[in-house]
Amino acid sequence: MDGNGRWATAHGYSRSAGHEAGLRAARNIVEAAVREGVGTLTLYAFSSDNWKRPGAEVTALMRLFRRALLGEAKRCLDNGVRLTILGRRDRLPSSLRHTVEQVEALTASGANMHLRVAVDYSARDAVLRAASALRGDSVSREAFGELVARVDNDRLPARDVDLVVRTGGEQRLSDFLLWECAYAELKFVSKMWPDFTADDLAEALADFRGRNRRFGLAPEQVAS
Ligand code: FPP
């Protein structure tokens, strides 16, 4: 969800107003993703490196997350969306942690789509913590993937990412789901996140459906 700050600056608003606009875009995209039949949607809301932002912005974001979770829980329930948080929880304000637990419990039966909001998330930290849990044992890719998911309280069995859409014109992964993105298709969009619409999501999905995914095989092997 990149570009909230630049969108705000371009419109003469505060960065907080940009994040509010980002929340409105997120609401639209979640509903559009359900309609499109997306199985799991992960929104990258706050990376572990985002703690380094100015304290006032971090505090405002933590408040926004709590308000958003409280405000969206009923909508998720109505849309059959299971909402969970991906990332470390021990550094979140306790009020937010409590809200996360409430919303996760309330929406646990949602079967139409799994919405993961990544907060205090770092893929490299997740891989490191999973590797430490191994204590020198060697395991399969699948088993390691389960460990990576488990350290962030994610659902099991773990799944690879099919498509990453990054808004805001940047073309990098920024520590997002590095293990799970081994064969992800990447789509970079110049629009700022608050301007990203259901039509943009549909276009990204159409583009994804047209990709030729080979997973290391030769083209003729894929064709057969
Ligand atoms: C990146 O834009 C966006 C964020 C750091 C926060 C995004 C959070 C929300 C939209 C709230 C969503 C909440 C829920 C619960 C779904 P940026 O600030 O890095 O923008 P910039 O690159 O233009 O500075």
Image: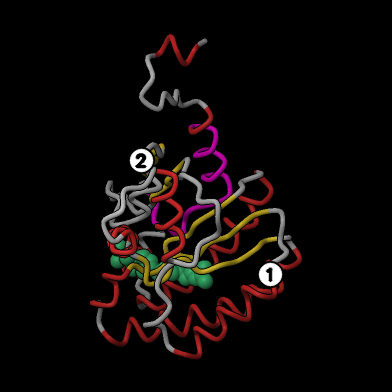
Q: Is residue 158 visible?
A: yes
Whether the magenta-drawn stretch holds residue 196 is answered as yes
Q: CA distance from mark 1 to mark 2?
A: 29 Å
Specify whether 31 is left or right of 187. Answer: right
Nearest to the observer: residue 100 or residue 5:
100
Tell me the quadrant of ligand 1.
bottom left
> Quarter-wise, where is residue 221 in the image?
top left
Q: Main secondary structure of the magenta part?
A: helix
> Quarter-wise, where is residue 79 in the image?
bottom right
Specify whether 100 is left or right of 80. Answer: left
Residue 107 shows which numbered tag?
Answer: 1
- For marks 1 and 2, the one nearer the N-term is 1
Tell me where residue 151 appears, x and y as whole percent: 41, 65
Question: Callout 2: 10 Å neighbours few (<14), some, many (20+)?
Answer: few
Q: Which residue position is annotated with label 2?
A: 182
The coloring applied to the image is: secondary structure
Tell me where residue 224 appears, x and y as whole percent: 52, 10
Nearest to the observer: residue 45 or residue 24:
45
Magenta residues span 191-207
Residue drawn at x 53%, y 62% is 116
> Could you tell me the amino acid type at mark 2?
Ala
